[in-house]
Image (tube, rainbow, N blue to C red):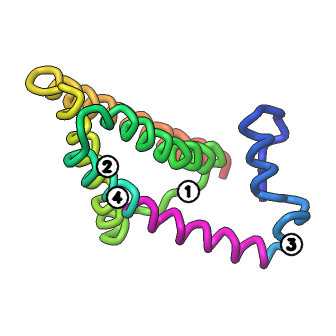
Amino acid sequence: MSTSNQTTRGNAFTRWVLDEDGDWWGDEQERMRRYEGIALMEHAQMILFPSVMAVMAWTCPKSAAPWLLAALLAFLYPTMFGTAYVLKRHVRVARWRRNQVLWTALSLGPIIAALAGLASKLGLSGAGLTGSIVGGVVLGLIGLMAYKAQLARRARSSAELD
């Protein structure tokens, strides 16, 4: 297990949670079973929580919308933190197959539905909502292109080293 030796709050938190010394979760096999359990839990939460949030976003009173938005963003932050951790460690990503596409649809669909419901409750409609959606899609595509370019650079540098 490799973590950076650079001391930052994120790295200190990562070392503490991953328990590299085995003080908390035991040996490597026990730690691996724990990680598997966490992965199962995270996958279930990525469908269930946004689905509940989507229903609540469309049925809640307008006064609850800012609180629901805060809860949804707080839910999404650890996912972004974990994704950044994996990308920072240069983990090779397998080509997308049917399961990954299905999983992405099952997890992103409710998030988009929740955000749309919250946007309507917060009064973002018409041009404001359209602009937000277009901006989000454009920024997402830019991020995806930057990520693919980074993967291509890594592949080229690996090929040059070989």
Q: Does the magenta portion include 7?
A: no
Kindly tell me whether residue 157 is visible in this rendering: yes
Say which of 117 and 136 sits in front: 117
Label 4 Cα crowd, 10 Å radius (few <14 / some 14-19 / many 20+): some
Q: Which tag is nearer the camera, tag 4 or tag 1?
A: 4
C-alpha distance separating marks 2 and 3: 36 Å
Q: Which residue is mark 2?
A: 111
| Lower sequence index among marks 2 and 3 | 3
Q: Is residue 132 above or below residue 44?
A: above
Q: Which residue is mark 3?
A: 26
Q: Residues within 10 Å of mark 1 (few under 14, many from 20)?
A: few
Q: CA distance from mark 4 to mark 3?
A: 32 Å
Q: What kind of residue is marked 1?
A: Arg
Asked whether the beta carbons under mark 2 and mark 4 sit within 8 Å of each other, the answer is yes
Secondary-structure class at tag 3: loop
Tell me where residue 2 appears, x and y as whole percent.
Answer: 78, 53
Where does the image place residue 112, in percent across and percent down from the top left?
A: 26, 46
Mark in the foreground, 3 or 1: 3
Question: For mark 1, what is the residue?
Answer: 92
Q: Which residues are magenta?
A: 30-47
x%, y% of residue 87?
57, 46
The three-letter amino acid code for the residue at tag 4 is Ser
Residue 96 seen anywhere in this rendered image of the structure: no
Q: Residue type at mark 2: give it.
A: Ile
Is the stretch drawn in magenta largely helix, strand or loop? Answer: helix
Q: Which mark is residue 107?
A: 4
